[in-house]
Amino acid sequence: MSGPPRRPAGPRGGRRDRRPPRRAPLDGARLTAYDVLDGVSAREAYANLLLPQLLRERDLEPRDAAFATQLAYGALRAQGTLDAVLATLVDRPLADLDRRLLDLLRLGTYQLLDLRVPAHAAVATTVDLARAIVGPGPSGLANAVLRKVAAGGDRAAWLAQLGADGDRRLALATDHPEWIVAAWREALGGDAELEAALLADDAAPEVHLVARHVDRDALAEESGGTPGPWSPYAVRLGGGDPGRLPSVRSGAAAVQDEGSQLAALLLTRAPLEGPDGRWLDVCAGPGGKAGLLAAVRPAGVHLTAADRAPHRAELVRGALAGEDDVEVVVADGREPPWAPGSFDRVLLDAPCTGLGALRRRPEVRWRRGPDDVGPLVDLQTALLDSALASVRPGGVVAYVTCSPHAAETVAVADAAAARDDVEVLPVVPLLDGVPGVGRGSYGQLWPHRHGTDAMFLALLRRTR
């Protein structure tokens, strides 16, 4: 009688192959999203610059690229809420976790709370990434924590469990630090629009084009977009890659938020006393506003564009390529090389917290803190004093920041306006047709009102 059936002999004299089974390749979209979070946390990279680079290099399918974008930006934006949930499930401070593991936990938690990815998929793919990136031990922790996240339900269920109220609840529900909630309330003058403004920061922005040397209607037809409602040069796109458009590739058009366009145009519309032949963009990098100023200025106007960083000055040169009667200089606006009173119009788009562009740079809300505001206000004040010295008596300065924070906006402009040689020019009459833009004598654009970045606009005339 024959014995029991024998297993087929392995490759080594009948011994079984004990190598671990080959694992499926890592999920490309989720790995790309992780690499964005890793770049932001490890190198302070900007997600809106890093992600497009990774998508080009990895050539993901459109559906995977869209998911990687949604996952990376969403997890960065929701970091505070994700960390609040994770802090209840990890038996040590989150700061003590391996930084890579924490980023992976955030990715997994975001999928479970906000994207409604099935729990088995969100947990398994995140654990696979953790095993490959951090190791088998941390992957076990990831598995345990994410299963608890899944058991707790979606975002609404977790917010109820966290038991937050007041500004803490609003901060967690809208993915903002509490200090920004308070700053937005002050800028808006109350609570009526507060939640709508915060939620607008969480929506993906439209791409806006500026028609510099091409007819706006022709650009809209070429791009499949629609004319912008506020700037006569703006086109708003519903999707697609603007870099592929012939007008953008030639430099006849460019990507520029409609609010930034209005900031540059405001300077050109200000009533002026005396000659009008010398314009200055004092903090010009990367060159978007200088490019529009060069395109719309009257014949005979000389434009000087300055930036203290050489690499940003090079970007400005690129934006002004092909323009006549322009110069680009590397200069610190606080210690300029030009003589006082050299210019008729000066644009100061001052360095700021960037809180007005949180839609585009979701990580900035967690990278910035209230302690950053004071040093920036000092810089803004010094730059505005220098800009007012650079303009001749009768000339105008447009003070612009991409932030609605009161300290960076109204307070800086009011301090300059308190001088006995400075007069405030009302902004609203020069932005006719733009509703809800007034902020006293100044102007304030908002994503939830205007579909633009939250740009602050002030016009100051030097009287003597």
Image (spheres, rainbow, N blue to C red):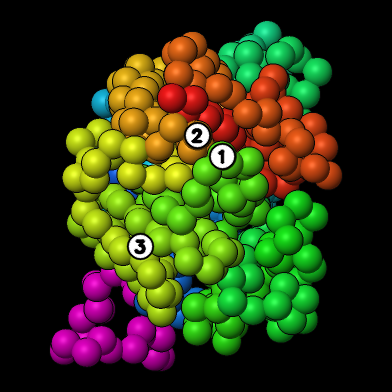
Q: Can see residue 375? A: yes
Kindly indicate whether the residue at mark 1 contacts the one at mark 3 (C-beta within 8 angstroms).
no
Q: Is residue 149 magenta?
A: no
**Amino acid under label 2?**
Gly
For residue 316, the mark is 3
- Residue 252: x, y in percent? 55, 78
For the magenta stretch, what is the residue range?
A: 1-25
Residue type, label 1: Glu
Residue 239 horizontal/vertical position (percent): 69, 69
Considering the whole magenta stretch, tell me its main secondary structure: loop
Q: How busy is the neighbourhood of tag 2: few (under 14 within 10 Å), some, or many (20 plus)?
A: many
Report the amino acid beneath label 3: Val
Q: Is 297 on the left or on the right of 156, as rendered?
A: left
Residue at point 59%, 14% (across, down): 182
Q: Nearer the viewer, residue 399 or 175?
A: 399
Quarter holding the N terminus is bottom left
Where is residue 272 drawn, in percent x and y? 58, 41
> Which numbered disc covers residue 273?
1
Query: On the image, which quarter does residue 382 sit in?
Result: top left
Q: Looking at the rendered structure, which numbered label has been put on residue 394?
A: 2
- For the residues labelled 2 and 1, say whether their Cβ atoms are less than 8 Å apart: yes
- Across the whole image, how many numbered discs are drawn on residues? 3
